[in-house]
Amino acid sequence: MYTKSRKFVLASAITLALASISGAAVAGAMSQDLTSARQESQIWTTYSLSPYLRANDLQVSVNEGTATLTGTVEEDVDKQLAKQIALGVGGIEKVDNQIKVDADYVSPSRLSDERSFGEVVDDATITATVKSKLLWSKNTDGLDMDVDTRMGTVTLSGSADNGASKELAGRMAENTRGVVAVDNQLVVDKAKPASKDGDEAAEHDTSEAIADTWITTKVKSTYMYSSNVENDDISVSTENGNVTLNGKVSSGAERELAIELAQNIRGVKSVNATALTF
């Protein structure tokens, strides 16, 4: 009786041990599969967002830290770019680059009117950027404007207080990175009364309440989003709503644009650009 009991206990222990080992193996395999899937998704998403690779039909598979790339590109430099992107993903130790190079290759996506994932992201980014710039501007904030972007073309619709506001909104959209054209459909609302001295005074009081750090951040962000201003070469500081620009620009036109963009930000009382040279 004692011997049978010992044998039963031993058999049970062995069964539980095997089950534990099997469960650990399954869990390990699932963890590896999830890691590979995450790495595949990260590589593919980067390809989709890259303006150099998004038009190509590339496939990615990952197995235990090795990424296998297949598909076709037009130039060898694109093949090498795809490899370097894959190697930049955490956990990828090796790349089996099977991408073919064909100078005459035309991706099916280029023959379609449908936007790619990367193009949709680009358009959404442009729309958000233009909306932000309009919101930050003292001359367009609060106006009933709508922004839509498709393939880099921005459409502005809604109403503007006057022709100057409409023109300014169009210029702000045109000077946004990634924008190829602007369709300014804003309608000037002539029925809206012009601002009075009291309104201007109230606006001035509101401007004074805006923090200097907020103003500096928005001026810098506006430069960063602008396609005609090199924001890395311009330093911005603000004290009591007075903005000071310092640095070097490439031309007088860029300097004037930098000043205009700063002046349009809500809360800005004045812009000192004497130290901004070209």
Image (cartoon, rainbow, N blue to C red):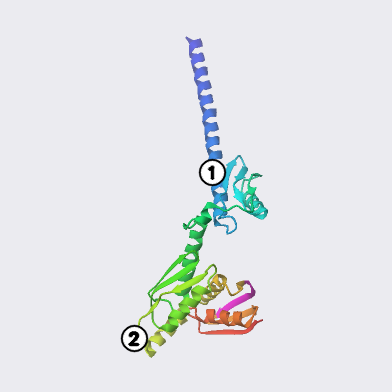
Q: x%, y% of residue 212?
A: 52, 77
Q: Amino acid at mark 1?
A: Ala
Q: Residue furthest left?
A: 191
Q: x%, y% of residue 159?
A: 37, 77
Indicate whether 253 appears above or below 54: below
Q: Amino acid at mark 2?
A: Pro
Identify the image quadrant of residue 231: bottom right
User: What residue lies at 52% left-to-right and 18% top-to-bottom?
Assistant: 10
Q: Magenta region: which residues?
A: 232-238
Indicate whether 44 appears above or below 235: above
Indicate whether 126 appears above or below 162: above
Residue of label 2: 193
- Whichever of callouts 1 and 2 sits on the residue coming sooner in the sequence is 1
On residue 57, the disc is none
Evaluate whether residue 50 shows in this view.
yes
Structural distance between the alpha carbons of marks 1 and 2: 59 Å
Count residues near mark 1 (Cα–Cα under 10 Å), then give few for <14, some for 14-19, many for 20+: some
